Amino acid sequence: MARTGLNEREAAAAGFATLSVAVESTTRAGYHPGATRMTTKLVVERRSGRLLGAQIVGEEGAAKRVDGLAVMLWNGMTVEEMTGLDLAYAPPFAPVWDPVLIAARKAAERVERDMHNLD
């Protein structure tokens, strides 16, 4: 398990309106021996889409992925901006679509949907 930034409770206490997404994926290419499940959760500011925090649970690779998320958080990235990142693909260590990218795409879709519902 690894985390960076705020969880939902901490974000709410700090006055943020949030949304969160959790996605399940694999730690490496599914056809590669030893692939295991990983859950990635992003906490996002509802109106701006800015990343506020992240948690990852998985057997391997959680800490390294959270390191990347910490850099994204430090730089004030939105989930929309995160979807354009080119994260490494190496079958023994990461699937074509990294769990972080899958979560960012799902969160960006939620932010977009919420923005249309507010209009």
Image: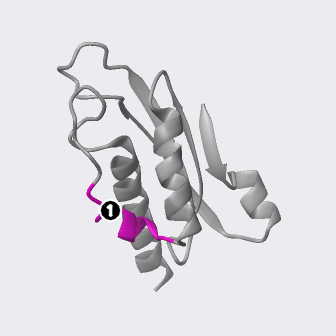
On the image, which quarter does residue 23 sit in? top left
State which quarter of the image contains the N terminus: top right
What residue sits 41% from the left and 78% below the top?
A: 116
Chief secondary structure of the magenta portion: loop
**Could you say which is closer to the camera, residue 20 or residue 80?**
80
Q: Is residue 101 inside the magenta stretch?
A: no
Q: Identify the residue at horizontal 58%, vertical 66% (top origin).
A: 74
Residue 19, image quadrant: bottom right
The 10 Å Cα crowd at callout 1, few under 14, some 14 to 19, many 20 or more, is some
Give the side of residue 106 with respect to residue 65, left or right. left
Kindly give the residue lying farthest to the top in the view shown. Answer: 33
Q: As drawn, is 39 to the left or to the right of 83?
A: right
Q: Is residue 79 left or right of residue 88?
A: right
Coloration of the structure image: one colour
Q: Is residue 51 above or below residue 60?
A: below
From where the camera sits, is residue 98 visible?
yes
The quadrant holding residue 12 is bottom right
Left/right placement of residue 3 relative to residue 84 reads right
Question: Residue under circle 1?
Answer: 83
